[in-house]
Amino acid sequence: MGEPVFVKKHKRSRAIRVMPLNLAPLIDINANLLFFLIIANSVQEDRLQAGKDIELPPSTSSMAEAGDLVSVVVGMDHISVNELNIEPSPIKDGELQATALDPKKDNRITSLHTRLTERFQDLVKKGAQPGAKDDDDSKLPVVLIQADKRLPYATVAKVMRTCGEAGFTKFRFAAKAR
């Protein structure tokens, strides 16, 4: 046999081929994630904060309802409707002033009734249905009462009576989460 033949191999220069990266799915996922986080954060911000100097009682429920909501904050020295204080303040040290009560109806706070009646009429113009049947109460306007836990029951009862006489029949009470 003959001599072994060595074949000289030529090294080929291979160009490294990089596969193109498709960024469309990555952008879609990030957009969906961003959208979800924005919505989740806005829901967090919608939670009502207790009014200034208000100590809410603890809650036994984790459910809350939204809708045509009117917030009534009753503190030891002020009452506000949707963050607008009622002036002059009908309450002092947790007790209603005699001058703030309607002389014809002792259980109605005149200035609060006026403000709530205006708000109720605005909600009716926007489509709230105060006479909705029990099976469709989603269109009923809701009053959220945030009352300081130090207030006497008589004061809170008069606020509730005033809300009812202004047309609101659906009540919710704010409380501190445990």
Image (tube, rainbow, N blue to C red):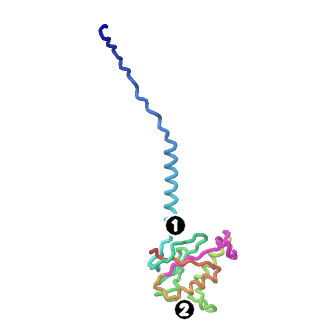
* Residue extending farthest top: 2
Q: Is residue 18 magenta?
A: no
Q: Is residue 136 magenta?
A: yes
In the depicted structure, whether residue 27 falls above or below residue 2? below
In this rendering, the answer to whether 82 lies above or below 103 is: above
Does label 1 or label 2 sit earlier along the sequence? 1
- Give me the residue at 55% from left, 90% from top: 99
Q: Position of residue 107 (x, y in %)?
A: 59, 89
| Residues rendered magenta in the picture | 126-147
Quick one: label 2, few (<14), some, or many (20+) residues within 10 Å? few
Q: Which residue is mark 1?
A: 46
Q: Where residue 158 appears, x then y in whole percent?
A: 57, 87
Q: Secondary structure at mark 1?
A: helix
Residue name at image x 32 percent, y 11 percent? 5
Quarter the N terminus occupies: top left
Quadrant (top left/top right/bottom left/bottom right) for the C terminus: bottom left
Tell whether 2 sits left or right of 40. Answer: left
Which amino acid lies under the numbered mark 1 shown in the image of this protein? Asp
Q: Which mark is residue 98?
A: 2
